Image: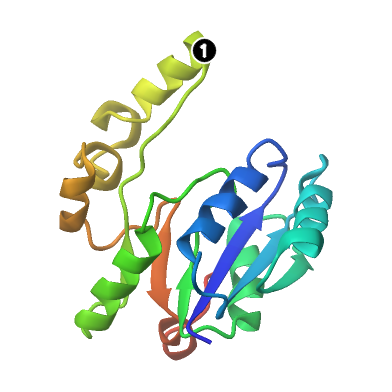
Amino acid sequence: MEVTVLIVSRNEEKHILNCINSIEKQFSHNNDWELIFIDGISHDRTKIIAKNYLEKKAKYKFKIFDNEKKILSAGWNIGIKNAKGKYIIRPDAHATLEKNYINKALEILKNNPKIAVVGGILITKAKGFWGDIIKNALSTKVGVGNSSFRTGAKSTSEQKKIILNFGCKMTSKQIIFVEIAFINC
């Protein structure tokens, strides 16, 4: 299997289906991938929504796990330990992937053996007055520091300049977790 997609989630019932749908669109002609959904003991319907959707609609392999520790790094480790793919894609549950994100990320990794991890720009979206205020803060150096994946790339064409990003979208070779270490939690 070439690709494992890990979604680590907690209380994301409003976003989880958009995330899953954006991932599925990446593989419209390829079912040789798996999705691993790890729920951090959500208080809302996140796990129920994801489970019901996957059981009824998925034409690919999927696994569902609970993350008793409720923190992202513990969830990532559960996913990594159960992943079968050579490459791991890690979008956050509230994120949606841009068209061809996975193909572009895999192309970079396959054509550049010295690169082990790639990521994309993060475009913050908002709804309403307060959402716009938060979006604007999260898109400035004052709000997030010198994070080029948030502030330095204003367009998709600038995304190519940003190779390493452990933000809300990340693609990596699974071997780096095996050879180096799992994520501390």
Query: Residue 18 in the image: x percent, y percent?
Result: 59, 44
Query: Residue 160 in the image: x percent, y percent?
Result: 18, 57
Residues 12 and 28: in front is 28
Q: Quadrant of residue 145?
A: top left
Q: Amino acid at mark 1?
A: Gly
Residue at the far bottom in the pictured view = 179
Q: Is 6 situated left or right of 52 in this image? A: left
* Residue 87 seen in the current view: yes
* Residue 68 seen in the current view: no
Q: Quadrant of residue 179?
A: bottom left
Q: Is 3 situated left or right of 37 in this image? A: left
Q: Is 56 situated left or right of 59 in this image? A: right
Q: Is 68 situated left or right of 135 in this image? A: right
Asked if 73 appears above or below 155 in the picture, the reply is below
Query: Residue 144 in the image: x percent, y percent?
Result: 33, 35
Q: Secondary structure at mark 1?
A: helix
Residue positioned 30% across, 40% down in the render: 150
Residue positioned 79% across, 52% down in the render: 47
Q: Which residue is mark 1?
A: 128
